[in-house]
Amino acid sequence: MTAEPRPPGGQTWPMLRAMVGIGLVCGLAIVLAYRWTLPVIERNRAEALRRAIFQVLPGASSSATFRFDEPAGFAPAAGRAADARVVHAGYDAQGRWVGVAIEAAGMGYQDTIRVLYGYAPDREAIVGFQVLESRETPGLGDKIGLDPEFLANFEQLDVRLEADLSRLAHPIELVKKGEKEEAWQIDAITGATVSSRAVARILRASADFWIPKVRARAEQLREEPRR
Amino acid sequence: MKVVDEKADAMPTDVFLKGLWRENPTLVQVLGMCPTLAVTNTARNAVAMGLATLFVLVGSNALVSAIRNWVPKQVRIASYILVIATLVTMVDYAIQAISLDLHRALGAFIALIVVNCIILGRAEAFASKNGVRRSVLDGLGMGLGFCLALMLLGMVREVLGSGSLFGVELFGPRYEDWVIMVLPSGGFFTFAAWILFFNWRKQRRAATREAR
């Protein structure tokens, strides 16, 4: 590669003017596009989350987000609550608490997998599951969000607690396809073992953290906060 | 081989049509392979990527052509990249506003439109030497040609790999998906098959012309 001849000093100003001018105009255009689309993007995100909450909590028709802090426990989250220490409580048409939807994330085969699962305290089980974000291999790993047999694992996945409500009685386990015998086991997907294992690990860690807290402070979530 | 002179006084319709077929950026010039092979696992993704690239290509051709006499040649490539990156960022926001699912499906490949060599190639080879109107026509032709090629790949891969077209089930539950077609290797197979078809057609037409 040959280097471009060095421009004489008199050409510095046109170059500077062109680069700075284009940079300023481009920066302004990006800011305008961002400001213009931001409200729509946030509305889309909130709507996608709302749909996912109702899908993982069968029977829920409204939801409220709660933030968790030690030692106070759960308190309604004001405004947007986009951090890891929140749960979404779901209520049915009569305003009865049906459970909580919890976001969890962890490393998959390609990249971070983000999931949302529903926990119903009266059934002491995970009752719904949805993949919010994943870059798993199309046709193989992405089946964690599509395969009906795999998703059937999460219609009633046992997460009962020890008598003192301190931890899960049986940590969630992954077993080979067709070998599921216990209610706390997940049947893996053939050909997508790494992604299935990642889902089991993400759920085990998240359930171990959240479910004792939700059960111990259920009273704080039972009432739907007034809007 | 006939050298295509970008500055020749070709008719506006020819400027537009050459990108669609004769100089198709993907199937003839074999440019922009990264998105071509990566996001054509479904017809919908292919069309979305094609349209996003079309918008950036038309916009960058128009702007590069408009500023061509004002930008010193030493900084022209840096200026083009700035313009292209800005348009791509705007498209990225627009797709997030239109559909989050689509944005998720296209993933990192939206941002990678910046380095799609078709766009910089047309800016340097055509827009920097021609007027705005002709540059827009060139961008439209090349962009639609890219869309067409992506759609041809996406349709074949989705039908064989998922048994559906634009998300509509075609063969029912008894169809066994050819998973390999939605994986990267399926992209190479389909792409090779389309290039084979295009070259076969080209040779056949040349032979017919000679016979006359």
Image (cartoon, rainbow, N blue to C red):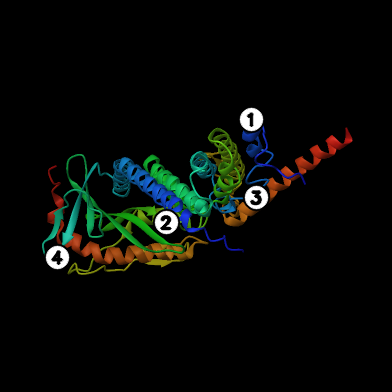
Q: Chain of mark 4?
A: A
Q: Residue at x 38, y 45 (%)?
A: A25
CA gap between label 3 and label 2 equals 30 Å
Mark 4: which amino acid?
Answer: Glu
User: On the picture, is A118 further left or further right than B126?
Assistant: left
Q: Earlier in the sequence, mark 4 or mark 2?
A: 4
Circle 3: element type: loop
Question: What residue does disc 3 label?
Answer: B30
The residue identified by callout 1 is B13
Viewer-closest of B33 and A67: B33
User: Which x, y percent locates residue B98?
Assistant: 39, 40
Which residue lies at the image location 37% right of the left edge and 43% below the top edge? Answer: A29
Q: Chain of mark 1?
A: B
Q: Which residue is mark 4?
A: A70
| Residue A200, numbered circle | none
Circles 4 and 3, Cβ within 8 Å, touching? The answer is no
Which SS class for mark 2?
A: loop
- Give a yes or no on whether discs 2 and 1 share a subunit: no
Do pointers 1 and 4 mark residues of a single chain? no
